[in-house]
């Protein structure tokens, strides 16, 4: 029996390669059908690659499209990492990067120089990556519905791009970290005025509400690449900033999950008729043990060895989820939201 699900793909820079692995494994399961995807930043890139590949050549096309996306990401040369690092295996490399993290050149540049300081020499390093998508495929009717989240700089509100509104600029806006990239200008369809956009993670990482449509399945799998919990209190300036970023980029997701939990409780208590609000069944695929070993440095530097290590970790996490919760899909929620917000 085919189980239809929705996916919510978090942003997190190069850590999005974990989601690549999750998607790669889900595509191998003929009993899983993905009806809709909402994504932010790296999640938007993964969602666009998935959708384009499905529209072109089904499951095999989606796997190829994702592989090509992350090959392009691993070849991005603007992230300024010395070539000698290419000789390391992934696990020792993580230890090297952890030591180097407070001295990351990208962090130093982002704190000292505005992206507007480059003047006519400014380039968004992700534009050549995103421009290689075929937007006829990304915006096609075939395949899952796709929603891309970005944050309007002027209003601070989330904007969700879907259908024909998904474009190179929409995806770049969703992945636009304001201390690294210049804001992306996109016209407001109602007023025609140009609006500036930053990373969608500030207001929806990713936004879940597009998936609450009655015609979409109840099951929602969140692929989480930002640790919800860190046991140790950060003490260094770098670790403090890293945890602030994680909390900031999880806050919108937690807010929507809390709202889902509240509606579930009202329905269970009989306070609200089940037909008035959608009863969403939430599941999560994550590897917090791995993600707590990583840092903002590994988010900003797409080193091929680390990307492939993350892909394998994503495949393993998806495999573990299917082993443990395949029978839950369509029947019950596997994420314990009551405990999360208790």
Image: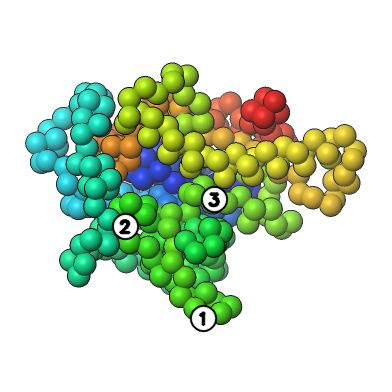
In depth, the one of 39 and 70 nearer the eye is 39
- Sequence-wise first label, 2 or 1: 2
SS label for mark 2: loop
289 w.r.t. 106: above or below: above
Q: CA distance from mark 3 to mark 2?
A: 19 Å
Reading the image, the residue beneath label 1 is 192
Residue 144: x and y in percent read 55, 58
Q: Quadrant of residue 50?
A: bottom left
Q: Please provide percent x and percent y for residue 134.
A: 37, 68
Instruction: Identify the coloring.
Output: rainbow
- Measured from the top left, where is residue 29 in percent x and y? 51, 41
> Which disc is residue 204 wearing?
3
- Of 236 and 57, the residue lying toward us: 236
Q: Is residue 107 above or below residue 166?
A: above
Q: Position of residue 186 (x, y in %)?
A: 44, 72
Image-based side of 163 in relation to 91, left or right: right
Q: From this viewpoint, is residue 324 visible?
A: yes
Which residue is depicted at the point 40% across and 26% down? 292
Disc 1: CA contacts within 10 A as few (<14), some (14-19) or many (>=20): few
Counting residues from the start of the chain, the first of labels 3 and 1 encountered is 1
In three-dimensional space, the C-alpha distance between marks 3 and 1, rounded to whole angstroms, equals 24 Å
Q: Is residue 316 visible to us here?
A: no
Numbered circle sitting on residue 181: 2
Between discs 3 and 2, the one toward the N terminus: 2
- Position above or below: 178 against 299: below
């Amino acid at each position: 029996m085919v189980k239809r699900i929705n996916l919510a793909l978090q942003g997190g820079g190069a850590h999005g390669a974990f989601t690549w692995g999750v998607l790669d494994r889900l595509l191998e399961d003929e009993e899983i059908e993905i009806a809709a995807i909402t994504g932010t930043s790296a999640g938007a890139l993964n969602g666009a690659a998935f959708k384009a590949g499905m529209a072109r050549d089904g499951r095999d096309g989606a796997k190829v499209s994702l592989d090509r996306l992350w090959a392009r990401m691993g070849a991005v040369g603007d992230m300024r990492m010395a070539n000698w690092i290419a000789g390391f295996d992934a696990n020792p490399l993580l230890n090297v990067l952890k030591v180097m993290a407070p001295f990351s050149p990208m962090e130093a540049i982002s704190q000292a120089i505005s992206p507007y300081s480059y003047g006519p020499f400014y380039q968004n390093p992700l534009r050549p990556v995103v421009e290689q998508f075929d937007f006829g495929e990304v915006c096609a009717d075939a395949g899952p519905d796709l929603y891309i989240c970005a944050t309007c700089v002027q209003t601070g509100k989330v904007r969700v791009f879907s259908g024909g509104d998904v474009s190179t600029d929409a995806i770049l806006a969703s992945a636009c970290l304001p201390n690294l990239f210049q804001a992306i200008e996109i016209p407001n369809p109602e007023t025609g005025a140009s609006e500036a956009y930053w990373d969608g993670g500030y207001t929806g990482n990713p936004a879940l509400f597009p998936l609450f449509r009655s015609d979409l399945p109840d099951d929602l799998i969140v692929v989480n690449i930002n640790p919800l919990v860190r046991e140790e209190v950060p003490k260094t300036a770098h670790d403090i900033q890293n945890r602030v970023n994680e909390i900031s980029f999880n806050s919108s997701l937690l807010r929507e999950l809390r709202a889902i939990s509240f509606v579930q409780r009202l329905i269970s208590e009989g306070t609200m008729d089940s037909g008035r609000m959608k009863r969403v069944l939430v599941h999560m695929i994550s590897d917090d043990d791995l993600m707590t070993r990583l840092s903002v440095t590994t988010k900003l530097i797409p080193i091929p060895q680390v990307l492939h290590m993350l892909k394998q970790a994503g495949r393993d996490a998806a495999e573990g989820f299917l082993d443990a919760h395949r029978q839950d899909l369509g029947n019950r929620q596997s994420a314990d939201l009551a405990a999360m917000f208790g």
